[in-house]
Image: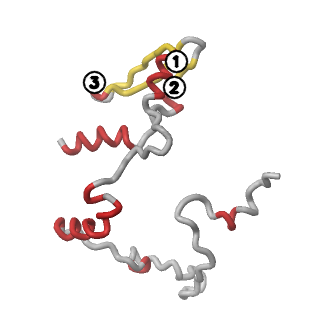
Amino acid sequence: MIKAVSEYLGRYTHKVAISNHRIMDIGPQKTTFGYKDYRQGAKKLVMGLDNMEFIRRFSMHVLPKGLVRIRHFGILSSSAKQGTIPLVHQVLGAAQLPVDPRALAQYNPQYCPYCQKETMVSIQRLPKRGPPRTVFSALLPSKN
């Protein structure tokens, strides 16, 4: 039961409403696309809809600006995560993750593969999201 629920939710929480490869034809009056009917054992079917109906159904999956698709609450909420996640790991008997990156699978980010010593030095700390601005700014075309 739990596996079926997670598969069902996974199909809808981590994908777009319809990907481009599923759209087969867009005509002046009708849009045709493929889909899987999971009630029939994931059988692949084709559906054609009037363009206005297709747009209406597609727009039902567009979130309003600022609304997040998946919100974390309970033990995963931002305010509770610090205290509850270690407690959950303890209750489930899960191993604690090491904080030091050198302890992860014998990987040491300061280890140089050429001289075989810890000589690598960090020269820049990248932001958590987005591309590294200063490193790639020379490669990007100018906006002028």
Considering the numbered disc 3 on the image, is that residue within a helix, a strand or a loop? helix
Q: In which quarter of the image is residue 7?
A: top left
Q: In which quarter of the image is residue 82?
A: bottom left
Q: How far apart are marks 3 and 1 (CA)?
A: 23 Å
Which of pointers 3 and 1 lies earlier in the amino acid sequence? 1
Q: In which quarter of the image is residue 67?
A: top left
Looking at the image, which residue is at 83% across and 52% down?
A: 144
From the viewer's side, name the closer residue of 35 and 29: 29
Looking at the image, which residue is at 50% across and 41% down?
A: 65
Which of pointers 1 and 2 lies earlier in the amino acid sequence? 2
Image height of 35 relative to 91, above or below: above
Image height of 45 relative to 96, above or below: above
Residue type for callout 1: Thr
Considering the numbered disc 1 on the image, is that residue within a helix, a strand or a loop? strand
According to the picture, the residue beneath numbered tag 1 turns out to be 31
Q: Do the residues labelled 2 and 3 touch (CB within 8 Å)?
A: no
From the viewer's side, name the closer residue of 110 and 140: 140
According to the picture, the residue beneath numbered tag 3 turns out to be 40
Q: Do the residues labelled 1 and 2 touch (CB within 8 Å)?
A: yes
Give the percent coordinates (x, y) of residue 38: 30, 29
Q: Distance between the residues labelled 1 and 2?
A: 8 Å
Residue type for callout 3: Gln
Numbered badge on residue 14: none
According to the picture, the residue beneath numbered tag 2 turns out to be 23
Quadrant (top left, top right, bottom left, bottom right) of the N terminus: top left
Please name which of the two marks, 3 or 1, marks the residue nearer to the observer: 1
* 78 sits to left or right of 86: right
Q: Distance between the residues labelled 2 and 3?
A: 21 Å
Give the percent coordinates (x, y) of residue 63: 45, 37
Give the percent coordinates (x, y) of residue 118: 54, 87
Q: Are marks 3 and 1 in contact (CB under 8 Å)?
A: no
